[in-house]
Image: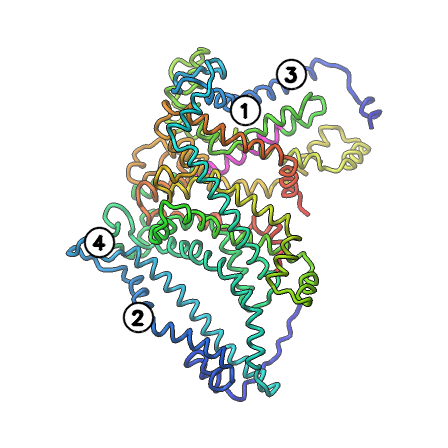
């Protein structure tokens, strides 16, 4: 659709627009006889001006984050983190104010344009009745918007900002000490040659390896089981199916914690069973050996994850139209050809999006690691950075926040993880019903 | 059809027999691998001994009783954790339904300048993973004096789900003909009445879906409650069960197993009832329209 651009004729009288630019609502009040609306706009600007010292204090605080005052008792020292949160709140309020200010100027211009075309300004009564309409919309939207501002937007801005500070234990934790802006230093630390960089490189690589292997094993496992069960000569396929679906029905967290105990090196029944059978003489350190722990995480995840793909692939295979098979039979295709030329391509084609979704889920699959190994076992690189052998970025971030209080590094990681995840999120959401059916 | 397959059935051969033997042995061993951890947990929950080391490696080979369940309710706050989780899930569900449906209704039925930018912002916000603001949420909740309270947790859950659910519900409301509620308004009904009496009843399936997903969401969520709830009596089931066993594997496994069985059984039952629906959802997700 080509949009024709009409030239808007310039306003003859620009005075109201200028008046509203100088002070909110002045154009509407002085020139355009919009007393209620004008007063409302003017009131907003008045409120902001009266409270301007808080705005300035808040934003200055955000810039300086407070000077260290070792001379004061701890409770009276400036708390950089509170200053930061409050600074962001004032920034958000300021942004809302600026948006309202622009709206006010545009409103004055629109009123003037309508006036020059029709020769009348809308009456106060007309404004009040349109206000009744909009008030439902405003009251309806405000709870959601406030909640999102406070609990979604504010934390995101705050986290992003933390990545550029030195907010970390032991030297920069308020209230005893202040926090400072450090620019890109944290990013440089991760990219440099420190133990941090080593831990980051190892964890990032393992996160990718883990996501690839865990998704692939579950997919292939699910595919093989689905293929075995679709075989007409297998008796009681549904009994098998019900058994195989069980790991999907039990909450993953519980299964993972059970597996942690089954694989316990000392008392775990699996080691005891293997010893009893005479297969091994010494207990195997399933979860405390560097390589073995990584393998265990993937194998246990296979136990958890194959039912999902089994269900999915069975669904796709039964939905392949029967006439495709009949037609190919007439053309002389045997079972093997049918499988490789019809069934498999159909299954692959239709499950690729879900494979990608599952991959992006596994990139952040905190539970699969944290509940099974807690990120361990540990080694030299762990002592400073906290990242264990099986830690993925997500579980490392969690430990950095909760146990080690390295908030700045956790924030850097969350930014990096977000950059990796974002394309997947866009892809996933663009496929959902919500997106396809919703129009803007 | 049957005539064709009957004709095509190949005669008995050793090779085919071996294939089926192999297939059955694979299916049976996978079944054992799948069932063993579940049966072991079930048998541990009903064992009389308290230690992991004392359990027999094969399930149900030891004396059984309800001792672990008694311990769970007498020695831990399990009942409290359960009630806490139930409370959080219920309030979250109600709050999400109210806030999201009203928001979606406004987005679906009103025209205003900020509508497009707001919808786009919601779209972008739902892309951020929930953990991205974790540290900030902790400090925010702390600053608001809501640390170790359920209110902070509920507000965060409900707020976090608004962006995606608003898109979902708005998409559904857009499919309901506007003439319906416009007719009601011509008859003198206000926006609220037409929303409450006309739109909501039609959108019931979607509202139920929203209520159910926001009810089940908090049950096994771990990260947020672990971060925000401090005292034992305020914990949710997931955190309580985790801390019951973390670092005390050998002594508390059987009690943990009892707690896990109590949570998992309702989950399995709900799953069994919804399995057909779930398979459909999964399949429809796979099949591109």
Which residue corresponds to mark 4? Answer: A75
Residue occupied by mark 2: A53
- Same chain letter for marks 4 and 2: yes
Tell me: A321 left or right of B198.
right
Q: Is residue B248 magenta?
A: no
* Magenta segment: A207-225
Q: Main secondary structure of the magenta part?
A: helix
The residue shown at (62%, 78%) is A6
Q: CA distance from mark 3 to mark 2?
A: 83 Å
The answer to which quarter of the image holds residue A11 is: bottom right
What residue would you read off at disc 3? B21
In this rendering, is residue A309 above or below A430? above
Placement of B96 over or under B68, stated as above or below:
below
Disc 4 versus disc 2: distance between alpha carbons? Answer: 24 Å
A308 horizontally vs B150: left or right = right
User: Which residue is labeled 1 in the image?
Assistant: B34
Q: Position of residue A192 (x, y in %)?
A: 32, 47
Of labels 4 and 1, the one closer to you: 4
The mark closer to the camera, 3 or 2, is 2
Q: Residue at x 37, y 22 (%)?
A: B250
Residue A341 in view, yes or no: no
Q: Is residue B185 visible?
A: yes
Q: Nearer the viewer, residue A296 or B54?
A: B54
Subunit of label 4 = A
Q: Chain of mark 1?
A: B
Q: Are marks 3 and 1 on the same chain?
A: yes
Tell me how far mark 3 sits from mark 4, CA to CA: 75 Å
Residue A9 spot, x, y in % from top left: 58, 84
Estimate the spatial distance between the alpha carbons at disc 4 and disc 1, rounded to whole Å: 56 Å
Query: Does the CB distance between marks 3 and 2 fall below 8 Å?
Result: no
Q: Is residue B212 left or right of residue A200?
A: right
């Amino acid at each position: 659709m080509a949009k024709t651009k009409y030239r808007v004729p310039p306003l003859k009288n620009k005075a109201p627009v200028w008046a509203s630019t100088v002070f909110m609502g002045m154009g509407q009040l002085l020139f355009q006889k919009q007393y209620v609306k004008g007063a409302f706009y003017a009131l907003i600007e008045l409120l902001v001006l009266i409270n301007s010292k808080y705005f300035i204090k808040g934003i200055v605080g955000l810039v300086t984050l407070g000077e260290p005052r070792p001379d004061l008792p701890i409770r009276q020292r400036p708390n950089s983190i509170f200053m930061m949160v409050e600074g962001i709140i004032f920034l958000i309020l300021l942004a809302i104010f600026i948006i309202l200010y622009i709206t006010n100027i545009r409103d004055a211009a629109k009123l003037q344009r309508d006036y020059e075309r029709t020769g009348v300004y809308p009456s106060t009564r007309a404004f009040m009745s349109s206000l009744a309409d909009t008030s439902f919309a405003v009251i309806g939207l405000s709870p959601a918007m406030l909640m999102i501002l406070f609990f979604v937007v504010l934390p995101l801005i705050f986290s992003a900002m933390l990545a550029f500070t030195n907010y970390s234990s032991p030297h920069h934790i308020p209230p005893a000490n202040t926090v400072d802006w450090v620019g890109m230093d944290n990013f440089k630390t991760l990219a440099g040659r420190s133990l941090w960089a080593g831990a980051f490189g190892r964890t990032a690589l393992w996160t990718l390896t883990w996501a690839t292997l865990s998704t692939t094993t579950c997919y292939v496992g699910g595919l093989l089981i689905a293929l075995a069960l679709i075989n007409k000569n297998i008796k009681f396929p549904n009994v098998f199916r019900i058994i195989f679906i069980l790991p999907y029905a039990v909450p993953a967290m519980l299964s993972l914690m059970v597996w942690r105990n089954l694989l316990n090196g000392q008392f775990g029944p699996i080691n005891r069973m293997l010893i009893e059978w005479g297969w091994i003489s010494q207990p195997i350190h399933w979860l405390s050996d560097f390589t073995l722990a990584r393998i265990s995480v993937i194998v246990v995840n296979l136990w958890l994850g194959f039912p999902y793909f089994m269900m999915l692939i069975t669904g796709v295979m039964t939905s392949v139209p029967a006439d495709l098979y009949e037609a190919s039979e007439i053309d002389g295709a045997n079972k093997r050809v049918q499988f490789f030329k019809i069934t498999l391509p159909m299954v692959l084609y239709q499950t690729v999006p879900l494979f990608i979704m599952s991959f992006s889920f596994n990139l952040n699959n905190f539970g699969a690691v944290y509940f099974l190994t807690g990120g361990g076992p540990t080694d030299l690189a762990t002592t400073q950075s906290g990242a264990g052998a099986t830690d993925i970025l997500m579980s490392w971030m969690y430990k950095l926040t909760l146990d080690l209080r390295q908030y700045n590094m956790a924030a850097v990681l969350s930014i990096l993880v977000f950059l990796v995840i974002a394309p997947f999120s866009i892809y996933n959401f663009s496929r959902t019903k919500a997106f396809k059916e919703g129009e803007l | 059809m049957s005539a064709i397959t009957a004709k095509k059935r190949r005669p008995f051969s050793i090779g085919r027999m071996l294939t089926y033997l192999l297939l059955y042995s694979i299916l049976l061993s996978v079944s054992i691998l799948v069932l063993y951890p579940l049966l072991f947990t079930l048998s541990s929950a009903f064992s009389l001994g308290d230690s992991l080391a004392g359990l027999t490696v094969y399930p149900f080979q030891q004396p059984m009783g309800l001792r672990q369940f008694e311990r769970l309710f007498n020695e831990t706050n399990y009942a409290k954790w359960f009630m806490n989780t139930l409370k959080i899930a219920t309030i979250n569900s109600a709050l999400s339904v109210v806030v999201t449906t009203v928001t979606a209704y406004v987005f679906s039925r009103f025209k205003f300048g900020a509508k497009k930018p707001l919808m786009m912002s919601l779209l972008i916000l739902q892309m951020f993973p929930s953990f991205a603001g974790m540290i900030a949420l902790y400090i925010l909740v702390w600053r608001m004096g809501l640390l170790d309270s359920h209110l902070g947790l509920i507000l965060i859950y409900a707020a976090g789900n608004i962006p995606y659910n608003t898109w979902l519900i708005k998409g559904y409301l857009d499919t309901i003909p506007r003439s319906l509620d416009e007719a009601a308004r011509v008859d003198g009904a206000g926006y609220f009445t037409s929303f409450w009496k006309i739109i909501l009843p039609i959108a019931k399936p979607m509202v139920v879906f929203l209520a159910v997903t926001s009810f089940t969401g908090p049950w096994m969520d771990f990260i947020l409650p672990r971060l925000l709830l401090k005292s034992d009596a305020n914990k949710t089931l997931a955190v309580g069960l985790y801390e019951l066993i973390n670092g005390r594997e050998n002594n508390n496994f059987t009690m943990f197993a009892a707690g896990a069985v109590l949570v998992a059984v309702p989950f399995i039952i709900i799953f069994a009832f919804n399995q057909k629906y779930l398979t459909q959802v999964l399949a429809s997700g796979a099949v591109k329209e």
